[in-house]
């Protein structure tokens, strides 16, 4: 019995290390078990937890700057910068690449090629500019008491949206991130969604929590439609763009309802 418990704990530990190494810049990879291969699909249950940690850390920075006398408008860009630093700009890069590809108006193969190009185009630059502007203005609108739940839950729901899209959408390519997520089952996806939903209920008024979850699901459905229409499947860039869309939309919702 004890050996079974230890085995499960080791799997949870490996999942936490795997997710942290992929989704963040936290130096957790040095603690990885070298004898156990990572299973990115299995680790999806804890993706929302890392979102909550990223949101909590950036909220702490916001409140610290306010204590130092900064206005909300001055503190908000630093919060966005903090989140980009913690994730290495992973999701923002996906948003820019996605918009460059989908905005090109080319055939599917060309869109996928454009999305792999490291250079940023006009569509990607505009998308990043608008995305950052929405986040900054939403944070500047929120009262101080709502900063922590808004940042924590928007980041949590954004990370929970990725497994949903992967579960109900085929991969556009047979390699890369798609290959690592081929083993993602509905049970694992539901575990991720349940984790995010519980955190939302814990930190937000229940009505707002339900609305935020419904908004997240609606955006994932929309992303799935656009993904199948333009690319015939998801890519890592699409997942990053999904995170950005959910974060921007839920922060806007919180700015409207938590003031």
Image (spheres, helix red, strand yellow):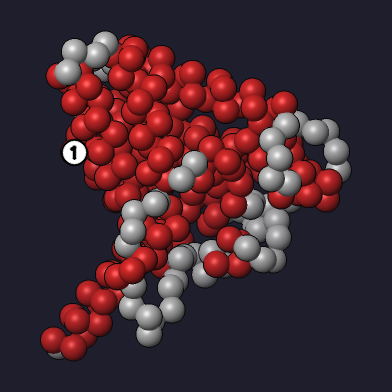
**At x 22% / y 74%, what residue is drawn?**
9
**Does residue 75 appear in this view?**
yes
User: How many numbered callouts?
Assistant: 1
**At x 65% / y 58%, what residue is drawn?**
171
The residue tagged 1 is 202
Left or right position of 3 against 229:
left
Q: Residues within 10 Å of mark 1 (few under 14, many from 20)?
A: few
Residue 208 versus residue 48 in the image, above or below: above
Q: Position of residue 167 (x, y in %)?
A: 53, 57
**At x 30% / y 74%, what residue is drawn?**
11
Picture quadrant where residue 77 is located: top left
In terms of secondary structure, where does tag 1 sit?
helix
Left or right position of 223 against 199:
right
Q: Position of residue 178 (x, y in %)?
A: 61, 61
Picture quadrant where residue 8 is located: bottom left
Q: Position of residue 4 (x, y in %)?
A: 21, 85
Left or right position of 132 against 49:
right
Image quadrant where one finds the N terminus:
bottom left
Q: Where is residue 154 in the image (x, y as percent from the top left)?
A: 36, 34
């Amino acid at each position: 019995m004890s050996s079974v418990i230890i085995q499960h704990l080791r799997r949870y530990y490996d999942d936490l290390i795997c997710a942290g190494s992929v989704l963040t810049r936290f130096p957790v990879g040095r603690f990885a078990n070298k004898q156990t291969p990572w299973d990115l699909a299995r680790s999806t249950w804890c993706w929302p937890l890392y979102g909550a940690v990223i949101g909590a850390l950036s909220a702490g920075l916001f409140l610290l700057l306010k204590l130092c006398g900064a206005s909300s408008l001055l503190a908000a860009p630093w919060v966005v910068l903090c989140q980009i630093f913690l994730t290495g700009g992973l999701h923002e890069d996906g948003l820019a690449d996605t918009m460059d590809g989908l905005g090109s108006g080319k055939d599917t193969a060309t869109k996928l090629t454009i999305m792999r190009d490291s250079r940023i185009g006009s569509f990607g630059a505009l998308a990043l500019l608008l995305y950052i502007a929405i986040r900054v203005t939403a944070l500047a609108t929120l009262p101080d008491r709502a900063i922590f739940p808004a940042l924590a839950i928007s980041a949590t729901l954004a990370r929970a949206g990725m497994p949903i899209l992967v579960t109900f959408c085929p991969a556009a390519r047979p390699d890369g991130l798609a290959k690592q997520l081929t083993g993602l089952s509905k049970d694992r996806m539901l575990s991720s969604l349940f984790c995010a939903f519980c955190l939302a209920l814990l930190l937000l008024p229940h009505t707002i929590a339900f609305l935020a979850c419904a908004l997240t699901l609606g955006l994932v459905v929309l992303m799935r439609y656009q993904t199948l229409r333009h690319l015939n499947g998801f890519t890592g860039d699409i997942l990053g763009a999904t995170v950005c869309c959910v974060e921007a939309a839920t922060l806007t919702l919180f700015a409207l309802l938590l003031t």
